[in-house]
Image (cartoon, rainbow, N blue to C red):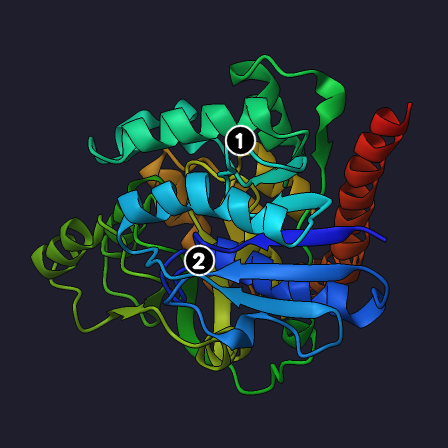
Amino acid sequence: MPRIGVNALYLIPGGVGGTEIYLRELLAALALFDAENEYFVFTNLETGPDLVPRKARFYWKPQAVRARFRPARILWEQTVLPLEASRYGLDVLFNPGFTAPVIAPCPCVTVFHDLQHKRHPEHFRWFDLPFWRMLLWASAHRSRTLIAVSEATRADLLRFYPVPSDRVIVIPHGADANCFALDRTRIEPYLLCVSTLHPHKNLERLVRAYARRRRDFRLVLAGMRGFHTRPIEELIAGLSVSDSVRLTGWIPRDQLYQLYERAQAFIYPSTFEGFGMPVLEAMAAGVPVACSDIAPLRDVAGDAALFFDPLDEDAIASALERIVTDAPLRQRLGQAGAERARRFTWERTAQQTLSVLTQTATALRTSAGG
């Protein structure tokens, strides 16, 4: 059975958004059904052993590097990690956070959550963009198999990187099982948006749409404070809605569950997504959803959401008004969302991912044997 390496050097707890949830849920799901393969999880100094399932054949391999100092993390990934892969005799190296070693002693499988640096480079800081361009190009061309989290991301991979189409596999995220069990009997008057504070999340249009008139419900923006936090804070203050718009910053999952549990409705105005995990979580919790009419979110929500044009502030204002005031619509969307979300499970994501990993490792052995 393959020895599988997991490159978690990128992970900063509470600092990388949905890619952290992805890896934690995936490893937990793998541990539930895979008792045969061995997993070697390489972490940084910020990430503790709680990332690694406490199951036989799962091994924590902490590395002496900090992810917050990106140059050091990149250098370690490109030089020391391949040596570690060789040391432990890995058959395949799984890279769940976009980047992979350019030279590795075993084939790599790399996950691309989106290609925002290609689609919207204007949303990146000038000193970050060169790293994204260079490292993701190298990962796409040096990895044996690429996993895209949506059909939209797969299309972007094939558009921007000339790789054979059979090397790019779509494996969607799963829905957090805890969301299905939330108690939705104590609803409070607030509209919830779960989002990192980055430019493409389009939160400024949402705040302006909300602030057009006095509301009898609050707006809660829950998520990591990204580098676009200050303009949003200044907008909230300038529109005099600080008493009704709340920025939570990063919060633990238990607190996020409480927000889903009591939210009157959920709104997601993002202009670009690779998948749209918060939309899926809200649906799983039975929260009625209004979201942007963009390809990944249509794939996730189907007919179980109220869609709007994220570039049209009037459309956003109309959607937030309707999702809060139209009770029959909320009831229909809440029920339809929970039903659709059950199609997305982390067990299925883990099974499909393991299939890709084992096939990639087996293909190399077969080729070498031939």
Which residue is at 83% across, 27% downward? Answer: 368
Mark 1: which secondary structure? loop
Question: Mark 1: which amino acid?
Answer: Ile
Task: Give me the disc on residue 40.
Answer: none
Asked if 155 appears above or below 353 in the picture, the reply is above
Residue 230 in the image, given as x and y percentages of width and height: 14, 54
Disc 2: which residue: 11
Q: Position of residue 253 (x, y in %)?
A: 49, 75
Occupied quadrant, residue 140: top right
Looking at this rendering, what residue extends furthest in the right direction? 370
Question: Which of 151/269 is in front?
Answer: 151
Name the amino acid type tagged 2. Leu
Res. 340 in view: yes
Q: Residue at x 72, y 58 (%)?
A: 341
Instruction: Choose between 146 and 264: the one closer to the eye.
Output: 146
Q: Quadrant of the C terminus?
A: top right
**Does residue 303 lie above or below 123 as drawn?**
below
The numbered mark at residue 103 is 1
